[in-house]
Amino acid sequence: MPAIDDIYYSLFKTQYDDREFSNVFWWRVRTVGTALVLADSINGWFLANLVGPLADMLYVAATIQSVETYLWKEPAADYDYTAIVEPGTSAGEGEPGFLSATFRSQRNGPGSRYSYKRFGGIGEGLVSGNDPFNDAAWDAVAAVLNDLIVFPEGTTMAPVQVKHSHTEVIDGVKVRVNDLPPVNTGVNPTINFDLTAVWAYHVGTQNSRK
């Protein structure tokens, strides 16, 4: 059964122009209800809340493919894969695959980092020059990204940023040290902070896709 501060990992995939786009979501259990597993309910949240607003931003040739969710410390105890295959609904022309609808979280004070979600395959009606156009569509996705999930069984979950690494000075040299525990080792990742404030957005690029 899930416990408070257990961390769930979701891999959300879309596709456009034979390219796959992946975004990672992390969730923290804030309160525990009666549900014995949560991964299928989290995937249900994606279907009910993110798929619709995101499809409105994506070009008709783009597709929301799937979401895979599991309890990081013990995937075998709570795992769910959901195929979605939902096409975009933005008509007209599609923007190049390297352009993305980029959403940026708040930070937790000086020195902390942002979290990002980047969705490729957006329709031309969502961009004007180098800037977002049709703010209602962008706002709808941004609002979902800071959702606190409340399940009928009494469990609540918050989107979070987890700690991947930190900097140490070793023999006079600054190096990055990995903090993310390996999956399936019975250890939850360390939480940096909850991502429940409003996300900003802009038209971004994914240079590796040019």
Image: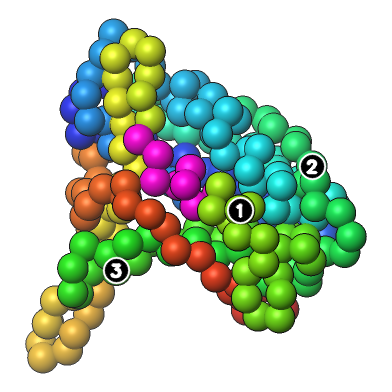
Asked if 174 appears above or below 48 in the picture, the reply is below
Q: Position of residue 156 (x, y in %)?
A: 30, 26
Going from N to C along the chain, the mark reached first, 1 or 3, is 3
Q: Which residue is mark 2?
A: 87
Residue 39 shows up from this direction: yes
Label 1 or label 2, whichever lies nearer to me, is 1
**In the depicted view, which residue is nearer to us: 69 or 125?**
125
Q: CA distance from mark 1 to mark 3?
A: 27 Å
> What kind of secondary structure does the magenta stretch mostly adopt?
helix
How far apart are the alpha carbons under marks 2 and 3?
32 Å
Residue at horizontal 82%, vertical 64%? Answer: 94
User: Disc 3 designates what residue?
Assistant: 113
Three-letter amino acid code of the residue under disc 1: Ala
Q: Element under label 2?
A: strand
Amino acid type at mark 3? Arg
Which amino acid, by three-letter code, is at mark 2?
Pro
Instruction: Specify which label sits upstream in the sequence, 1 or 2.
Output: 2
Q: Quadrant of the C terminus?
A: bottom right
Q: In the rendered view, would you say 65 is above or below 81?
A: below
Up the image or down, 31 lies above or below 115; here it is: above
Range of magenta residues = 141-148
**Residue 67: x, y in percent?**
58, 37
